[in-house]
Amino acid sequence: MLVRLHSLLGLVLLSLISGSISESTRSERIFDQLRLMRACAHRALHEPLENTTGMCDWAFDGWACWEPTAVGATARAPCTTLLPGPHHTAGAATYRCVADGTWDEGGANYVGCTSAADIDPELEVLQWIVREIGDFIPWEMGSSRGENILWEEKISDFKMCLADVILKPFPYRADNGSYCPRTWDGWSCWDDTPAGSTSYAPCPRFVAGFASHRMAHKVCNPDGTWFRHPTTKHVWSNYTACVDTLDLEFRNVVNFLYVGGYFLSLVALLISLFIFFYFRSLRCRRITIHKNLFSSFIMNNLCWILWYIYVIAQSQVIEENPIWCQVLHVLTQYFLVCNYLWMFCEGLYLHTLLVMAFITEEKILKWFLMIGWGFPLFPIIGYAVARGMDTELSKMCW
Protein backbone atom coordinates (compact mmCIF):
# COMPACT_ATOMS: atom_id res chain seq x y z
CA MET A 1 0.00 0.00 0.00
CA LEU A 2 2.82 2.38 0.93
CA VAL A 3 4.64 1.55 -2.33
CA ARG A 4 1.50 2.33 -4.35
CA LEU A 5 1.09 5.64 -2.52
CA HIS A 6 4.69 6.61 -3.27
CA SER A 7 4.21 5.64 -6.92
CA LEU A 8 1.02 7.69 -7.17
CA LEU A 9 2.68 10.74 -5.62
CA GLY A 10 5.62 10.31 -7.98
CA LEU A 11 3.33 10.25 -11.01
CA VAL A 12 1.46 13.35 -9.83
CA LEU A 13 4.73 15.20 -9.21
CA LEU A 14 6.11 14.12 -12.59
CA SER A 15 2.97 15.29 -14.38
CA LEU A 16 3.13 18.67 -12.63
CA ILE A 17 6.80 19.12 -13.53
CA SER A 18 6.29 18.06 -17.15
CA GLY A 19 3.27 20.36 -17.42
CA SER A 20 5.29 23.25 -16.03
CA ILE A 21 8.15 22.56 -18.47
CA SER A 22 5.67 22.29 -21.33
CA GLU A 23 4.07 25.66 -20.51
CA SER A 24 7.50 27.25 -20.08
CA THR A 25 8.62 25.89 -23.47
CA ARG A 26 5.42 27.12 -25.07
CA SER A 27 5.80 30.61 -23.59
CA GLU A 28 9.41 30.77 -24.85
CA ARG A 29 8.24 29.77 -28.33
CA ILE A 30 5.34 32.22 -28.30
CA PHE A 31 7.69 35.02 -27.22
CA ASP A 32 10.13 34.23 -30.06
CA GLN A 33 7.22 34.08 -32.52
CA LEU A 34 6.03 37.49 -31.31
CA ARG A 35 9.50 38.89 -32.03
CA LEU A 36 9.44 37.39 -35.54
CA MET A 37 5.97 38.82 -36.09
CA ARG A 38 7.16 42.25 -34.98
CA ALA A 39 10.26 42.07 -37.20
CA CYS A 40 8.12 41.08 -40.20
CA ALA A 41 5.70 43.97 -39.59
CA HIS A 42 8.69 46.33 -39.29
CA ARG A 43 10.07 45.15 -42.64
CA ALA A 44 6.67 45.50 -44.29
CA LEU A 45 6.41 49.06 -42.96
CA HIS A 46 9.87 50.15 -44.12
CA GLU A 47 10.00 48.11 -47.33
CA PRO A 48 6.50 48.59 -48.79
CA LEU A 49 5.52 47.48 -52.29
CA GLU A 50 5.33 50.35 -54.76
CA ASN A 51 3.07 48.33 -57.06
CA THR A 52 1.03 45.47 -55.59
CA THR A 53 -0.46 44.43 -58.93
CA GLY A 54 0.45 40.85 -59.72
CA MET A 55 2.13 40.35 -56.35
CA CYS A 56 1.40 38.72 -53.02
CA ASP A 57 2.16 41.19 -50.22
CA TRP A 58 4.17 40.63 -47.05
CA ALA A 59 2.79 37.86 -44.82
CA PHE A 60 3.58 36.21 -41.50
CA ASP A 61 2.12 32.75 -40.92
CA GLY A 62 3.41 32.22 -37.39
CA TRP A 63 6.67 30.55 -38.39
CA ALA A 64 8.22 32.64 -41.15
CA CYS A 65 8.08 36.08 -42.74
CA TRP A 66 7.20 35.82 -46.43
CA GLU A 67 8.46 38.52 -48.74
CA PRO A 68 6.42 39.93 -51.66
CA THR A 69 6.23 37.32 -54.41
CA ALA A 70 5.01 37.43 -58.01
CA VAL A 71 1.75 35.67 -58.93
CA GLY A 72 2.36 32.04 -59.85
CA ALA A 73 5.78 31.98 -58.18
CA THR A 74 6.77 30.07 -55.05
CA ALA A 75 8.50 31.86 -52.20
CA ARG A 76 11.17 30.14 -50.13
CA ALA A 77 12.18 30.80 -46.53
CA PRO A 78 14.85 29.19 -44.32
CA CYS A 79 13.60 26.71 -41.74
CA THR A 80 13.16 28.07 -38.24
CA THR A 81 14.26 26.24 -35.11
CA LEU A 82 10.90 27.10 -33.52
CA LEU A 83 9.12 24.36 -35.47
CA PRO A 84 7.99 21.35 -33.39
CA GLY A 85 9.48 17.89 -33.76
CA PRO A 86 12.78 16.99 -35.42
CA HIS A 87 13.59 19.87 -37.75
CA HIS A 88 16.10 20.33 -40.54
CA THR A 89 17.70 23.77 -40.38
CA ALA A 90 19.42 23.23 -43.72
CA GLY A 91 16.09 22.85 -45.53
CA ALA A 92 13.61 25.44 -46.68
CA ALA A 93 9.87 26.10 -46.45
CA THR A 94 7.81 27.12 -49.49
CA TYR A 95 4.69 29.21 -49.98
CA ARG A 96 2.91 29.64 -53.31
CA CYS A 97 1.42 32.91 -54.56
CA VAL A 98 -1.72 31.93 -56.49
CA ALA A 99 -3.28 33.59 -59.54
CA ASP A 100 -5.50 36.13 -57.72
CA GLY A 101 -2.54 37.69 -55.89
CA THR A 102 -3.13 35.95 -52.57
CA TRP A 103 -1.15 33.32 -50.75
CA ASP A 104 -2.22 29.68 -51.08
CA GLU A 105 -5.10 28.96 -48.67
CA GLY A 106 -3.50 25.63 -47.82
CA GLY A 107 -0.70 27.49 -46.08
CA ALA A 108 3.05 27.21 -46.38
CA ASN A 109 4.75 23.87 -46.92
CA TYR A 110 7.13 22.94 -44.09
CA VAL A 111 7.73 19.32 -45.14
CA GLY A 112 11.35 20.17 -45.89
CA CYS A 113 11.78 21.58 -42.37
CA THR A 114 10.10 19.16 -39.97
CA SER A 115 8.55 15.72 -39.84
CA ALA A 116 6.01 16.72 -37.17
CA ALA A 117 2.39 16.14 -38.15
CA ASP A 118 0.96 19.08 -36.15
CA ILE A 119 2.71 22.40 -36.75
CA ASP A 120 -0.08 24.76 -35.67
CA PRO A 121 1.68 28.12 -35.07
CA GLU A 122 -1.21 29.42 -32.91
CA LEU A 123 -1.39 32.48 -35.15
CA GLU A 124 -4.71 33.61 -33.65
CA VAL A 125 -3.13 33.55 -30.19
CA LEU A 126 -0.22 35.67 -31.44
CA GLN A 127 -2.57 38.17 -33.06
CA TRP A 128 -4.70 38.37 -29.90
CA ILE A 129 -1.64 39.06 -27.73
CA VAL A 130 -0.39 41.80 -30.08
CA ARG A 131 -3.85 43.34 -30.28
CA GLU A 132 -4.43 43.38 -26.52
CA ILE A 133 -1.00 44.13 -25.03
CA GLY A 134 1.25 44.87 -28.03
CA ASP A 135 2.26 48.31 -26.73
CA PHE A 136 3.65 46.83 -23.51
CA ILE A 137 5.58 43.80 -24.79
CA PRO A 138 9.37 44.12 -24.25
CA TRP A 139 10.20 43.78 -27.95
CA GLU A 140 13.86 44.80 -27.83
CA MET A 141 16.63 42.40 -26.78
CA GLY A 142 18.20 45.09 -24.61
CA SER A 143 17.36 48.43 -23.03
CA SER A 144 18.08 51.57 -25.05
CA ARG A 145 19.29 53.13 -21.78
CA GLY A 146 21.90 50.45 -21.08
CA GLU A 147 19.99 48.88 -18.17
CA ASN A 148 20.27 45.41 -19.68
CA ILE A 149 20.15 43.46 -16.41
CA LEU A 150 16.86 45.09 -15.42
CA TRP A 151 15.58 44.67 -18.98
CA GLU A 152 16.36 40.95 -18.94
CA GLU A 153 14.44 40.66 -15.69
CA LYS A 154 11.48 42.40 -17.32
CA ILE A 155 11.60 39.95 -20.25
CA SER A 156 11.76 37.05 -17.77
CA ASP A 157 8.69 38.37 -15.92
CA PHE A 158 6.81 38.74 -19.20
CA LYS A 159 7.60 35.14 -20.18
CA MET A 160 6.34 33.97 -16.77
CA CYS A 161 3.19 36.01 -17.38
CA LEU A 162 2.72 34.26 -20.72
CA ALA A 163 3.13 30.81 -19.17
CA ASP A 164 1.15 31.36 -15.96
CA VAL A 165 -1.62 33.74 -17.03
CA ILE A 166 -1.91 34.88 -20.65
CA LEU A 167 -1.67 31.44 -22.32
CA LYS A 168 -3.63 29.40 -19.81
CA PRO A 169 -7.10 28.16 -20.92
CA PHE A 170 -9.99 30.48 -20.29
CA PRO A 171 -12.02 29.06 -17.37
CA TYR A 172 -15.65 28.06 -17.67
CA ARG A 173 -17.84 30.65 -15.94
CA ALA A 174 -20.82 28.75 -14.55
CA ASP A 175 -22.32 31.91 -13.09
CA ASN A 176 -21.78 33.90 -16.31
CA GLY A 177 -20.26 36.62 -14.15
CA SER A 178 -18.47 39.62 -15.61
CA TYR A 179 -14.67 39.59 -15.46
CA CYS A 180 -11.88 41.97 -16.38
CA PRO A 181 -9.61 40.15 -18.87
CA ARG A 182 -6.08 39.00 -18.09
CA THR A 183 -3.40 41.42 -19.20
CA TRP A 184 0.20 42.62 -18.95
CA ASP A 185 0.65 46.37 -18.42
CA GLY A 186 4.38 46.53 -19.08
CA TRP A 187 5.32 46.10 -15.43
CA SER A 188 3.08 43.42 -13.90
CA CYS A 189 0.87 40.51 -14.85
CA TRP A 190 -2.85 40.65 -14.01
CA ASP A 191 -5.10 37.60 -14.06
CA ASP A 192 -8.84 37.45 -14.84
CA THR A 193 -10.52 39.48 -12.09
CA PRO A 194 -14.21 39.45 -11.07
CA ALA A 195 -16.08 42.69 -11.72
CA GLY A 196 -16.20 45.07 -8.78
CA SER A 197 -13.06 43.68 -7.13
CA THR A 198 -9.39 44.62 -6.90
CA SER A 199 -6.44 42.54 -8.09
CA TYR A 200 -3.03 42.70 -6.41
CA ALA A 201 0.46 41.97 -7.74
CA PRO A 202 3.99 42.27 -6.30
CA CYS A 203 5.80 45.47 -7.24
CA PRO A 204 8.26 44.80 -10.09
CA ARG A 205 11.91 44.41 -9.15
CA PHE A 206 13.20 45.90 -12.40
CA VAL A 207 11.81 49.41 -11.78
CA ALA A 208 14.27 51.73 -10.04
CA GLY A 209 12.89 53.22 -6.83
CA PHE A 210 10.28 50.48 -6.28
CA ALA A 211 10.17 48.28 -3.18
CA SER A 212 9.59 44.75 -4.49
CA HIS A 213 8.13 43.51 -1.18
CA ARG A 214 5.14 45.84 -1.56
CA MET A 215 1.98 45.30 -3.62
CA ALA A 216 0.50 47.19 -6.57
CA HIS A 217 -3.21 46.97 -7.32
CA LYS A 218 -5.55 47.23 -10.28
CA VAL A 219 -9.28 47.95 -9.97
CA CYS A 220 -11.85 46.02 -11.99
CA ASN A 221 -14.96 48.16 -12.49
CA PRO A 222 -18.47 46.73 -11.87
CA ASP A 223 -19.04 46.57 -15.65
CA GLY A 224 -16.09 44.20 -16.15
CA THR A 225 -13.60 46.76 -17.51
CA TRP A 226 -10.31 47.84 -16.00
CA PHE A 227 -10.21 51.23 -14.28
CA ARG A 228 -9.06 54.15 -16.44
CA HIS A 229 -7.13 57.13 -15.13
CA PRO A 230 -9.44 60.18 -15.00
CA THR A 231 -6.82 62.45 -16.60
CA THR A 232 -5.23 60.32 -19.32
CA LYS A 233 -8.29 58.07 -19.90
CA HIS A 234 -5.89 55.13 -20.28
CA VAL A 235 -6.23 51.81 -18.46
CA TRP A 236 -4.29 52.37 -15.24
CA SER A 237 -2.60 50.25 -12.60
CA ASN A 238 -1.86 51.82 -9.23
CA TYR A 239 1.84 51.58 -8.35
CA THR A 240 1.92 54.44 -5.85
CA ALA A 241 2.36 52.02 -2.95
CA CYS A 242 5.46 50.60 -4.67
CA VAL A 243 7.49 53.77 -4.32
CA ASP A 244 10.29 53.40 -1.79
CA THR A 245 9.88 56.68 0.11
CA LEU A 246 13.36 56.54 1.64
CA ASP A 247 14.90 55.99 -1.77
CA LEU A 248 12.72 58.77 -3.20
CA GLU A 249 13.85 61.20 -0.50
CA PHE A 250 17.48 60.30 -1.17
CA ARG A 251 17.04 60.84 -4.92
CA ASN A 252 15.33 64.19 -4.27
CA VAL A 253 18.31 65.27 -2.15
CA VAL A 254 20.69 64.22 -4.94
CA ASN A 255 18.61 66.16 -7.50
CA PHE A 256 18.67 69.20 -5.20
CA LEU A 257 22.47 68.99 -4.99
CA TYR A 258 22.68 68.76 -8.79
CA VAL A 259 20.46 71.82 -9.24
CA GLY A 260 22.35 73.72 -6.53
CA GLY A 261 25.72 72.93 -8.10
CA TYR A 262 24.58 73.93 -11.58
CA PHE A 263 23.04 77.14 -10.18
CA LEU A 264 26.26 78.18 -8.41
CA SER A 265 28.21 77.45 -11.57
CA LEU A 266 25.69 79.47 -13.59
CA VAL A 267 26.04 82.49 -11.27
CA ALA A 268 29.86 82.35 -11.42
CA LEU A 269 29.80 82.08 -15.22
CA LEU A 270 27.42 85.04 -15.56
CA ILE A 271 29.66 87.18 -13.33
CA SER A 272 32.71 86.17 -15.40
CA LEU A 273 30.91 86.96 -18.65
CA PHE A 274 29.84 90.36 -17.28
CA ILE A 275 33.48 91.16 -16.42
CA PHE A 276 34.62 90.20 -19.93
CA PHE A 277 32.05 92.51 -21.52
CA TYR A 278 32.40 95.40 -19.05
CA PHE A 279 36.16 96.04 -19.12
CA ARG A 280 37.45 97.37 -22.44
CA SER A 281 40.98 96.17 -21.70
CA LEU A 282 39.73 92.58 -21.94
CA ARG A 283 38.40 92.92 -25.49
CA CYS A 284 40.64 90.76 -27.67
CA ARG A 285 40.43 87.57 -29.75
CA ARG A 286 41.54 85.34 -26.89
CA ILE A 287 38.84 86.74 -24.59
CA THR A 288 36.27 86.36 -27.38
CA ILE A 289 36.97 82.63 -27.40
CA HIS A 290 36.59 82.63 -23.59
CA LYS A 291 33.23 84.40 -23.97
CA ASN A 292 31.95 81.73 -26.34
CA LEU A 293 33.20 78.93 -24.09
CA PHE A 294 31.51 80.46 -21.06
CA SER A 295 28.32 81.07 -23.06
CA SER A 296 28.16 77.38 -24.01
CA PHE A 297 28.60 76.45 -20.34
CA ILE A 298 25.86 78.89 -19.32
CA MET A 299 23.38 77.46 -21.84
CA ASN A 300 24.27 73.89 -20.90
CA ASN A 301 23.91 74.60 -17.17
CA LEU A 302 20.57 76.29 -17.76
CA CYS A 303 19.32 73.27 -19.74
CA TRP A 304 20.40 70.87 -17.00
CA ILE A 305 18.69 72.97 -14.32
CA LEU A 306 15.44 72.92 -16.32
CA TRP A 307 15.87 69.16 -16.90
CA TYR A 308 16.28 68.33 -13.21
CA ILE A 309 13.44 70.62 -12.09
CA TYR A 310 10.80 69.93 -14.76
CA VAL A 311 11.66 66.39 -15.92
CA ILE A 312 13.55 64.37 -13.31
CA ALA A 313 11.49 65.75 -10.41
CA GLN A 314 8.20 65.29 -12.31
CA SER A 315 7.80 61.57 -13.03
CA GLN A 316 4.55 62.08 -14.96
CA VAL A 317 6.42 64.20 -17.52
CA ILE A 318 8.65 61.25 -18.42
CA GLU A 319 5.58 59.03 -18.76
CA GLU A 320 3.63 61.54 -20.89
CA ASN A 321 6.70 62.24 -23.08
CA PRO A 322 5.68 65.74 -24.31
CA ILE A 323 7.38 67.39 -27.29
CA TRP A 324 8.95 70.16 -25.19
CA CYS A 325 10.68 67.52 -23.08
CA GLN A 326 12.23 65.89 -26.15
CA VAL A 327 13.30 69.32 -27.47
CA LEU A 328 14.91 70.14 -24.11
CA HIS A 329 16.83 66.86 -24.24
CA VAL A 330 18.13 67.62 -27.74
CA LEU A 331 19.15 71.18 -26.77
CA THR A 332 20.97 69.86 -23.70
CA GLN A 333 22.95 67.43 -25.84
CA TYR A 334 23.70 70.18 -28.39
CA PHE A 335 25.15 72.60 -25.84
CA LEU A 336 27.07 69.74 -24.21
CA VAL A 337 28.81 69.03 -27.53
CA CYS A 338 29.42 72.78 -27.93
CA ASN A 339 31.21 72.76 -24.54
CA TYR A 340 33.72 70.19 -25.70
CA LEU A 341 34.31 71.82 -29.08
CA TRP A 342 34.89 75.27 -27.57
CA MET A 343 37.43 73.69 -25.20
CA PHE A 344 39.01 72.20 -28.31
CA CYS A 345 39.05 75.69 -29.87
CA GLU A 346 40.82 77.07 -26.78
CA GLY A 347 43.60 74.52 -27.19
CA LEU A 348 43.73 74.98 -30.96
CA TYR A 349 44.11 78.75 -30.53
CA LEU A 350 47.11 78.31 -28.22
CA HIS A 351 48.58 75.87 -30.74
CA THR A 352 48.23 78.37 -33.60
CA LEU A 353 49.93 81.10 -31.53
CA LEU A 354 52.96 78.86 -31.04
CA VAL A 355 53.16 77.18 -34.44
CA MET A 356 51.56 79.65 -36.87
CA ALA A 357 52.35 83.01 -35.35
CA PHE A 358 51.53 85.07 -38.45
CA ILE A 359 48.02 83.77 -39.12
CA THR A 360 45.22 86.37 -39.17
CA GLU A 361 43.23 86.16 -35.92
CA GLU A 362 40.08 87.53 -37.60
CA LYS A 363 40.15 84.66 -40.07
CA ILE A 364 40.78 81.95 -37.50
CA LEU A 365 37.98 83.27 -35.26
CA LYS A 366 35.45 82.63 -38.04
CA TRP A 367 36.61 79.02 -38.19
CA PHE A 368 36.30 78.71 -34.42
CA LEU A 369 32.71 80.01 -34.56
CA MET A 370 31.88 77.40 -37.20
CA ILE A 371 33.53 74.63 -35.18
CA GLY A 372 32.11 75.67 -31.80
CA TRP A 373 28.51 76.46 -32.76
CA GLY A 374 28.02 75.07 -36.26
CA PHE A 375 29.64 71.64 -36.30
CA PRO A 376 27.60 70.25 -33.32
CA LEU A 377 24.43 70.77 -35.37
CA PHE A 378 25.29 67.89 -37.71
CA PRO A 379 25.58 65.04 -35.16
CA ILE A 380 22.71 66.42 -33.06
CA ILE A 381 20.33 66.72 -36.02
CA GLY A 382 21.24 63.18 -37.09
CA TYR A 383 20.71 61.97 -33.52
CA ALA A 384 17.31 63.68 -33.24
CA VAL A 385 16.09 62.36 -36.59
CA ALA A 386 17.25 58.79 -35.83
CA ARG A 387 15.51 58.73 -32.45
CA GLY A 388 12.41 60.48 -33.76
CA MET A 389 11.94 57.84 -36.47
CA ASP A 390 12.15 54.94 -34.01
CA THR A 391 9.06 54.72 -31.82
CA GLU A 392 10.82 52.43 -29.32
CA LEU A 393 13.57 55.02 -28.74
CA SER A 394 11.21 58.00 -28.61
CA LYS A 395 9.64 57.19 -25.26
CA MET A 396 10.23 58.56 -21.75
CA CYS A 397 11.61 61.95 -22.88
CA TRP A 398 14.43 60.19 -24.74
Image (tube, rainbow, N blue to C red):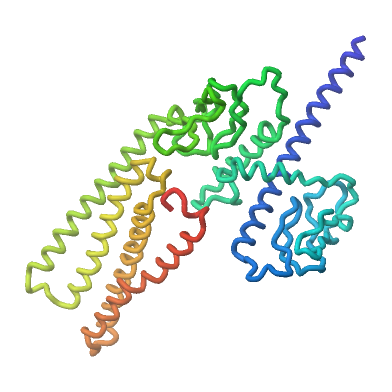
Asked whether, in this view, residue 241 is left or right of residue 5, the answer is: left
Compared with 291, 105 (above or below) is above
How far across and how far down the image is residue 336, in percent? Answer: 34, 62
Residue nearest the viewer, comparing 34 with 358: 34
The spot of residue 210 in percent (x, y) is 46, 33
Task: Indicate the quadrant where residue 317 lies.
Answer: top left
Task: Name the residue located 74 percent from the left edge and 50 percent from the top edge.
Answer: 62
* Outermost residue, bottom side: 358
Residue that appears at 36% across and 44% down: 312
Image height of 172 relative to 165, above or below: above
Residue in the image at 35% along x and 35% along y: 250
Q: Quarter holding the N terminus? A: top right
Residue 184 located left or right of residue 334: right
Please identify the quarter of the rendering in which residue 100 is found.
bottom right
Image spot of residue 269 (x, y percent): 19, 59
296 sits left or right of 18 in the view: left
Q: Nearer the viewer, residue 191 or 90?
A: 191
- Closer to us: 116 or 172: 172
Position of 178 relative to 82 (above/below): above
Exactly how many numbered labels are in the figure? 0
Q: Going 33% across and 70% down the picture, which residue do you hit?
A: 341
The outermost residue toward the front is 100
Left or right of residue 124, residue 284 in this image:
left
Residue 191 percent coordinates (x, y)? 62, 28
